[in-house]
Image: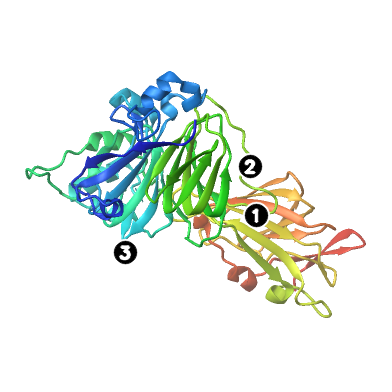
Amino acid sequence: MGPIKLTPIYNETIWAGKKLSEIRGYDWHSQGTSWEVSIHPSAQSVVAAGVNQGRTLASLVEEDHDGILGKAVTDQDLLRAAFLDAGESLSVQVHPGETYAREVSQDHGKTESWYILDAEPGATLVAGSDFTSRDAIKEAIDNNTIEDHLYRIEVKEGDFILVPSGTLHALGAGILALEIGTNSNTTYRFYDYGRTDANGNPRQLHVENSLDVVVCGQRGGYVETPIDNIPKVKRIADFPEYTVDLIDVCGEYVLPAHPDTFRTLSCVKGNAELIEGGENSVIEYTESVFLPASCKEVTVKGTCRLLVGTPRPHTVMTIKEPAYHTDFSNIRNGVEIASGSKKLKDIQNLFKNTDGVDKETVLYDVQTDDGDPNIPGSLSYGLTTVYPVRVNGECAFTRGHWHMDETVEEVYEGEAGEGLLMYMNHNGKTWCEKIFPGSVHHIKGDLAHRLINTGDVPLKVRAVWNPCAGHNYALTEQHPFAFRVFVEDGIVKVEEHE
């Protein structure tokens, strides 16, 4: 069975905008939500055309579960896709996780993500908060200072926001977004700006439920996906429950079959022809189709941007490639890996004698996936490669640093080569630990530290630290490490710094 086009299910909302109705040519402006793909009891998608026209998607599942959803897929694993057209800001809300949703609301938990199709200049959304405790939330409610604690992101076309369950969130005014999320319709409204309904009554809030499920300090993820007309396939969401892949097509692209599970396919830019098994159909801007598990490979022709949502059945354990590889060349959730190099000319003042040595010699490279210091618990990851360079016998080393916040510690792990991890405390006492593949080093926050290559091959060391740590390089220049390290005829020798 090929791609299935479904009839949108529109919902009236007090916050509805006009963008979607204008795109689709409808003369109404009160429908804020268009459910494109849904098998949830509260919104049953109906087949729009073909031999199954008029049948619900749920009835097709009852008839051929494995062919429509995939053998391992259960009700908990279903996805929904919907367009949200916000003329006004939505209420600040939060979704429960699976266990709480089952016990309290007889529904599934909800994790969601938003792709921004259009946004007015300066439009923002809420994706998290800086609350540190439920007591702090209650105090903000009493003092009417909720908005002071919300994490706002200014967005534009092509931005993608990840909202795990437990995250306070709200789509902002002037935004048209595609939501891809799990099979739930449970929303706990936490705050609504004092807004009233058509009869002048305050809108219902679910503060106690919200306090039960909110994860204090949690913020949503943010991925930029610029429109650059370059063909690409990029994973932009990697939740435990599902993934979202962005596909930019410029000409032709073949979407492989995926017999293990169904997928949702949404067009968020341009339009394209879909060809499967000799059958042709068209997907236009703001349209979505359902790809059953039995769907064969689909050839996409045209110029468009597609988003593919794929569930991860909770009854199946997946084994993935690790997030990091030696060269750090991959991208994690859309975060570009930053790279930098230090040449001898950059730190020549730290060496004893650089006469006769090419100042363009690269001493070390650093690649980092930087965390966010504004997100509690965020981590930075790094790979440092120190090359087997000798500067008139002195071993190549990193610049070395203290942490700006000396309460923050760090962990190093040797991956390749051999060398030394040099420490220094504030009294100038200096010592080293040998570093080699598999060695692990717990670095206290109040110690300066530096890597030194004493071997004949590149020394590679991984690091994990809290981005709040900061790096103070100037202090190690003002108060240098007490010793220098040389290698002579393969023997490590140490000499006191002048």
Q: Which residue is mark 2?
A: 322
Work out whether 27 lies above or below 396: above
Callout 1: SS: loop
Quote the CA–CA distance across marks 2 and 3. 37 Å
Where 136 sits versus 431, above or below? Answer: above
User: Disc 3 and disc 1: Cα gap in Å?
Assistant: 33 Å
Q: Which residue is mark 1?
A: 329
Earlier-in-chain disc, 3 versus 1? 3
Task: For mark 2, give the secondary structure.
Answer: loop
The three-letter amino acid code for the residue at tag 3 is: Gly
The front one of 329 and 217 is 329
Q: Nearer the viewer, residue 254 or 379?
A: 254
Question: Which is more N-terminal, label 3 or label 2?
Answer: 3
Q: Badge 3: how crowded within 10 Å, few (<14), some, or many (20+)?
A: few
Within the image, what quadrant is residue 336 found in?
Answer: bottom right
Which residue is denoted by mark 3 in the rendering? 122
**Disc 2 packing (10 Å; few <14; some 14–19; many ≥20):** few
Give the farthest residue toward the left.
199
Q: Which residue is found at the position 72% from the left and 45% from the top?
A: 439
- The residue drawn where x is 69% and y is 54% is 327
The type of residue carrying mark 2 is Pro
| x and y percentages locating residue 139 in the rendered image | 23, 46
Residue 81 vertical position relative to residue 404 in the rendered view, above or below: above
